[in-house]
């Protein structure tokens, strides 16, 4: 890989980055403690929301909430495209960047090929985020359709009402899952930017992002809020 301008520390740092991303995904989706993560716990409330929705005759509030979720997802999808475009423009300034980094104390020996490879990697991360957000937007749209298709509370076929509501819940969970993975790509893109300052900075930023994201899932104030139990006097 020397002809590409990547050193052994660069390869190790990139491997650590990929392993950290993969390990975090496994931690939240397949590990024994995944069910206690904030994302998975919120999935239970997505199901509860759709069940409560099916019991309401007036679903204007549900439609409004779905619209808000779609708008937020559309914002992140647009931001992803802007990030892809901004990253692509950096490829045109390769020669200037190489000269600037050569004069910096932490810049090291930056080559044109190494810089371009790093930028392409950043574009791929933001491109992945865009596809996740775009698909999430579409799934929220499907969820809204299922909400509208859920029979009324007084419908004669109660099993069908429950069935459609649960389908809406599962579609909602899928939409939230892809949205979360798009945001995860954004966070790891911040870690990836550390690579431009050097391999060791890349390792440090990756470790920092991994720790912060894991803490938010299992030890944050939001996690405490979802597990909050009111005092006994407030329950009566």
Image (tube, helix red, strand yellow):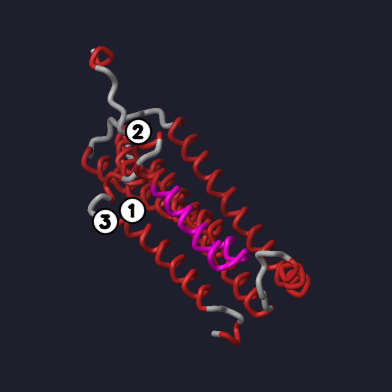
Identify the image quadrant of the N terminus: bottom right
- Identified at 59% across, 61% down, the residue is 193
Q: CA distance from mark 2 to mark 1?
A: 17 Å
Q: Position of residue 207 (x, y in %)?
A: 45, 57
Q: Is residue 189 left or right of residue 113?
A: left
Q: Secondary structure at mark 2?
A: helix
Q: Nearer the viewer, residue 202 or 19?
A: 202
Which residue in the protein does label 3 denote? 31
Helix, strand or loop for disc 1:
helix
Residue 228 visible somewhere in the drawing:
yes
- Hey, which quadrant is residue 197 in on the image? bottom right
Q: What element does badge 3 sit on?
A: loop
Judged left or right of residue 94, residue 224 is: left
Q: Is tag 2's residue or tag 1's residue first in the polypeptide sequence?
A: 1
Measured in 3D between alpha carbons, the distance from the residue under mark 2 to the one under mark 3, in whole angstroms, is 20 Å
For the point 47% across and 36% down, the residue is 65
Q: Earlier in the sequence, mark 2 or mark 3?
A: 3
- Contact (Cβ within 8 Å) of mark 2 with mark 3: no
Task: Identify the image quadrant of residue 83.
Answer: bottom right
Instruction: Name the residue that disc number 1 marks.
Output: 28
Contact check, label 3 and label 1, Cβ < 8 Å: yes
Quadrant including the C terminus: top left
Disc 2: CA contacts within 10 A as few (<14), some (14-19) or many (>=20): few
Q: Main secondary structure of the magenta part?
A: helix
């Amino acid at each position: 890989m020397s002809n590409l301008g990547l050193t052994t520390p660069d390869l190790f740092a990139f491997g650590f980055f990929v392993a950290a991303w993969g390990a975090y995904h496994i931690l939240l989706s397949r590990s024994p403690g995944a069910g206690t993560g904030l994302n998975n716990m919120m999935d239970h409330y997505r199901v509860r929301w759709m069940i409560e929705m099916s019991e309401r005759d007036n679903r204007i509030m549900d439609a409004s909430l779905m619209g808000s979720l779609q708008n937020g997802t559309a914002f992140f999808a647009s931001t992803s495209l802007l990030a892809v475009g901004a990253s692509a423009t950096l490829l045109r300034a390769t020669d200037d960047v190489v000269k600037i980094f050569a004069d910096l104390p932490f810049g090291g020996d930056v080559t044109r090929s190494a810089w371009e490879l790093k930028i392409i990697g950043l574009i791929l991360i933001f491109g992945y985020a865009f596809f996740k957000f775009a698909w999430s937007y579409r799934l929220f749209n499907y969820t809204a359709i299922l909400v509208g298709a859920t029979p009324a509370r007084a419908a004669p076929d109660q099993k069908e009402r429950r069935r459609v509501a649960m389908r809406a819940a599962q579609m909602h969970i899928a939409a939230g899952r892809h949205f979360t993975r798009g945001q995860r790509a954004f966070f790891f893109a911040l870690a990836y930017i550390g690579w431009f300052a050097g391999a060791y900075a890349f390792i440090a930023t990756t470790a920092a992002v991994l720790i912060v994201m894991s803490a938010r899932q299992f030890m944050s104030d939001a996690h405490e809020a979802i597990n909050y139990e009111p005092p006994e006097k407030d329950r009566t």
